[in-house]
Image (cartoon, coloured by chain):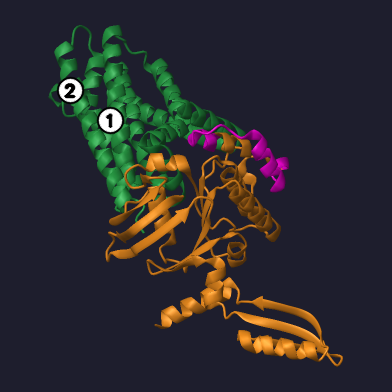
Chain colours: A orange, B green
Amino acid sequence: MIVIEAFNVKKTYPSKPPVAALKGCFLEISEGESIALLGPNGAGKTTFLRILTGILLPDEGAITVCGKTSAKSPSEVSRFLRFLPEAPFLLRNNSLWENALFWFSYWDEILPKNNLTEIFERFGLNDRAGEPLSRYSRGMLQKAALSFMLATQAPIIVLDEPTLGLDVITVKEVSDMIKELKKKNKTIIIASHDMPFVEDIADRVALINNGEILELTGISDFKEKYGNPRYLLIYRLGGILRTETFYNHEECNIKLKSIIANDAEIIEFRRECDSLEHILRQLLIKKSEV
Amino acid sequence: MNLFFLVAYLQIKGILRAARYGIQILLLPMLMISIFLTAYLAVRTLGGKVSALFFPFVVFILSATAINIPMQVGNQLLSDSSSANLLITSRGICGLLAYFIGSQAPYLLTTLISIIISYFFVLPKIYFLNSIIGSFILMIWCIAMILIGLAMGMRFVFAFHLAQIIFLGFYPFLLMLSLTGKLEYAFVLPPVGVITIFQNEGSLLPFSLVTSAGTTLYILAGIIFLKWAYQEYRIGKGVNRI
């Protein structure tokens, strides 16, 4: 079932000179899917998210969330959707639990105490849950805001740079929790520059540049298309360890047959692609050269 | 309403917890009292009637607070896309208003304390019926000021500084105007009318009706202005511009 549908979304900020932030975006997101919006700074990702959440009106086109148009009924859209902006808004003089009470009341949800306790525990926040957030570090504030997102009952979660300021262990914990949410059929939309994180959790990527969606595809298809897919073969022949890379399937088959015939020991054989980070960098460099 | 009380409770708890804000919370009433004392001493030096100061002072601080808080806090919160995204889209304008007023509840409480302190300074004569009518019109006037203040905070980038100009320039002018007793301004400037109602004994029904009509117009203007500002904000012409 399609839960989010963006149809020809255009937005130009009425500044002097006007800034065209989105130039006609089309996007469909299914229930239970996780999609990552990728692109350089100023590409239009945040504008897209702001139109999606209903805070901005598009000049043309519309985004519907569970059948409700975000431009016409932002409050109704917000029933289905929770948004974590890049810099989370938290009550700094209040404790973690007080913040939870505030946000879940603001969202008109019952405070999920058990669920939150478990998430705080996994993030290592339980011991300091009674302290005012003014004493928290940047990463801890991010964890606090993320906790609320991970505990909400809303079916769609939008995260803008969720791993900003987080250590590697916490990033892994966030990835695991997002995977758990996906199992519960929640839809996740992420705008991020953290490519390993995106690779770990996203089903699809939307590459945005200059207000246009350049590519919208499954993450493995995306890597296959742009990531120089190749076969890596490591084998031992006559006591010598050799490594060979093949960009051609046929060539690789011939080689495999030949080394098996020669009684070589295959140490490793795998198919690999460039990392998402590398692909993105290359694509954006090419685009800027054009 | 629940949200308003929750936000007010969390704000008070947060302020009490953070000891350094203990002083900050006293600043607003201290400012109010210092304005009052300046006027009080000036009137006394000139040989005027000090009790006549009380009602203009009450109307001045409540009106000024009602427009200043949404204008300044709204301007700050809405120009930051993080808070604006969360506050505006979750509950709409009503939720935003509940958050604003709730978050400023500690300051409103301390403002009320400053009014009580000033009352005991001058012990003005209170006329029961007129005080009730005056309070009612003043409340409506404050709601209009909140709507206009929030609209301005949402629409204009310079609203934060404009709020200070209104506080320091427009309302003192109004205060002085009311002391001269120019009743013909009641319709255009409801605070002047409200002060007159508070200060006079006997039936002031026609005058009260004229002031109420003026105040109602401000409410209508406030609603229209706020709707317009919200629309402009969502187009990207508000304080959220890039």
Q: Where is residue A99 in the image (x, y as percent from the top left)?
A: 57, 38
Q: Are marks 1 and 2 on the same chain?
A: yes
Residue A120 lies in the magenta-colored region: yes
- The reply to whether residue A131 is in sight is no
The residue located at (68%, 89%) in the rendering is A254
Q: Which residue lies furthest to the right in this view?
A: A239
Q: Name the residue under label 2.
A: B213
Is B99 displayed left or right of A268 in the figure? Answer: left
Q: Give the range drawn in magenta.
A: A102-127
Which secondary structure type mostly characterizes the magenta part of the structure?
Answer: helix
Residue A253 vs residue B61, the one in the foreground: A253
Q: Between marks 1 and 2, how big is the CA–CA gap?
A: 13 Å
Is A284 displayed left or right of B194 in the figure? Answer: right
Screen quadrant of the C terminus of chain B: bottom left
Q: Which amino acid type is shown beneath numbered disc 2?
A: Ala
Screen quadrant of the N terminus of chain B: top left
Residue A83 lies in the magenta-colored region: no
Counting residues from the start of the chain, the first of labels 1 and 2 encountered is: 1
